[in-house]
Image (cartoon, coloured by chain):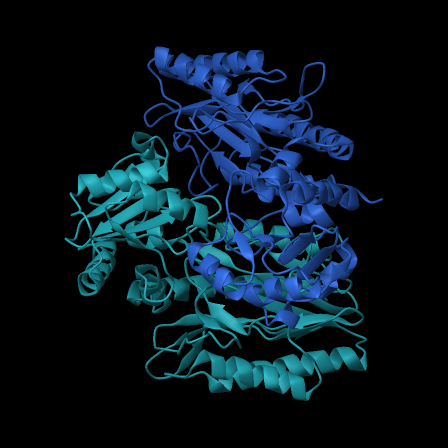
Chain colours: A cyan, B blue
Amino acid sequence: MSIYTRRRAKLFDWMRRENVALAIFEDVEGRRDPAIRWLSGHPGDALMALTVDRHSMLIPWDMHLAIFHADAEVVIPYDEFERSSCNAIRGVADYFHTPFGFRIEIPPQTPYPLFLRYVETLSDYDVICHEEGSIHAELAALRSIKDATEIDLYRRLSSITNELIELLENMVRERVITTELDAALFIEAQCRKYGCEGTGFETLVAGPTRSFGIHAFPASTAGAFATQGLSILDFGVKYQGYTSDVTLTFACPPLSRSQKRLLTLTEKAYNLALGMVGNNVPTLSIASEVDRFFTRATKFMPHGLGHGIGLEAHEAPAIRNRADNKWVLKPGMIFTLEPGLYDPSHGGCRLENDLLLTETGVEILTNSRIIYL
Amino acid sequence: MSIYTRRRAKLFDWMRRENVALAIFEDVEGRRDPAIRWLSGHPGDALMALTVDRHSMLIPWDMHLAIFHADAEVVIPYDEFERSSCNAIRGVADYFHTPFGFRIEIPPQTPYPLFLRYVETLSDYDVICHEEGSIHAELAALRSIKDATEIDLYRRLSSITNELIELLENMVRERVITTELDAALFIEAQCRKYGCEGTGFETLVAGPTRSFGIHAFPASTAGAFATQGLSILDFGVKYQGYTSDVTLTFACPPLSRSQKRLLTLTEKAYNLALGMVGNNVPTLSIASEVDRFFTRATKFMPHGLGHGIGLEAHEAPAIRNRADNKWVLKPGMIFTLEPGLYDPSHGGCRLENDLLLTETGVEILTNSRIIYL
């Protein structure tokens, strides 16, 4: 039984329990969803359908790619449905003889105008599109707990990430890397030498004059990196679809009192968060504790504390201080903690590592840190 | 009057005509929309609101970034709305005293479950979410006709793209570039030397064994490039937010009869399409003519013929053979033509250039071609 068959089996069971006859997943430009890669191995641009009587169909844009990558019972090219998702879903319901009146779940990302077209096309069915309690939420929850294969993969991926961190530190210290672009292009090239598909997201490299931005814009420039002040390097590499996500801060003397304080507070916040990580801990409690810590120091962190990683750079569990965050840490979760502080006059700093929660404790997968030059 | 003020003025006029009191634009992870950059200069992660009485508000995630980039009447950080788009839109309506019962337009990309929350939060308003006839469609139409500033920018961008094409051809001929990764990393590094922000999308480099894929996966590998057979190189570079998009095919002898036929048919299709480009021509007629041409040759092109380019790599006008395509070519439009054929046993080829339609004819901005080695 392939890993994809096992994963689909879990959703088939869920569909029986929840009385959903047909479930649709979609990965298209503008609405990316690696659920299809998780369910079938097919890397993207496709629709996927699961039925309660345990059938699966993949509808890829590129049939040639599907032949090489896709594990699904039936594969029919999107062209056969005139490249229309309405036609395709209707076609799937007809193909599998889905009984009229039964529930068809469509992705919660479905835009409202498209939802209306689906409802019209599928007027003889009960079309369901919701977030909480959806099969898509169930799939996100399943994906948030990594299986043995995924954990092995993250060990390899983390060791690649750590080798890159060491190389980057050395190259910065030896002044081989002196610009933001030097760092970005080095990661781009080097990660592939280790067998990575590429970077997991656009590498963010911000020298002292730009590190005040949460998300540097542009992502990297020809400007100086790791010169006097605070520089941020946020990167991840992608290995067999899965991404790491770490942030280094390079602190180059002389540092002002304000800069030292930003660094100390960020490290303290990181350790505070790390100390709270454990089985069954609600992530809201960790994130709100860190926010309170910063508030007491009259500082403010303008982003969430962390997030799950996997086939997406940001996935479940959320680790943020928002009332609607109901995530609880469980063994098998792989996630980041990334406290940071940003100041237009003094620059920014962020410290981010990838963690794995196990039955017995927390394992820090990556060696990111504040590097004092 | 800034370019942003002028652009917003066009939409204010539209709102008066269409009786829309408040319009919302959104650029967030999972729902990217460069409309906000086009309207304000702010590069991303924000909400933007326009009112019929000609006010504008930007709600950025990162206030520091907005201070450097944003042109808007009022800028209020997203944090003030507890990082909730529901709260933010409610807050905007309150701030501008939008009269109850009036129309508020939200983006047509809004997922159905979020749409329901908006309707609940804004229950005293008429919440509109549609595609055809929306302010978002109007903005896409405005963006499809480039203004003088944008056309100047495309001349610079095209000349950078063309320099890269020349360098790539030479480096391939001189065997400096021998792998897919060589080509991808060269573009990544070189484009920035010309002042680009980076690539416009992930560079696709596929040697002879992988060129059968429309969208190579992974995007580039350490495998051989431009060796015997057909290799595809699809790239674009981003300059001040705008992207080019070209595809080169490298044909390396000895070529089989089938490979020669793929190349000849693709070139003929490209010239056929180019000959039909003109003011007021429906793009559907060009795309369907090319599809008919391939059908007569018992071939099939598994993707659209072309697309507009600008702040997005794919934007209006659509140039594809689908009944719902109503786009008509107009002076000021900048778009690609990219016919291609793909065969798992013989490889693939695609030829893509960027074109500008002017009052007097068509200008081919880029020098992409099939390169016979």
> What residue appears at the point 31 percent right and 41 percent down from the top-left corner?
A121
A295 to the left or right of B283: right
Residue placed most toward the observer, A268 or A80: A80
In the rendered image, the quadrant that contains the N terminus of chain B is top right
Quick check: B55 above or below B183?
A: below
**Where residue A215 appears, x then y in whole percent?**
64, 61
Q: Is residue A366 visible?
A: no
> What residue appears at the point 80 percent right and 82 percent down from the top-left corner?
A257
> What residue appears at the point 25 percent right and 59 percent down from the top-left corner?
A7
Q: Farthest residue in the bottom direction?
A: A296
Quick check: A195 above or below B318?
A: below
| Numbered marks: total | 0
**Where residue B101 appears, x then y in whole percent?**
58, 57
**Where residue A137 appears, x then y in whole percent?**
35, 64
**Where residue A323 appears, x then y in whole percent?**
49, 77
> What residue appears at the point 59 percent right and 54 percent down from the top-left corner?
B26
A148 to the left or right of B287: left
Residue placed most toward the observer, B231 or B204: B204
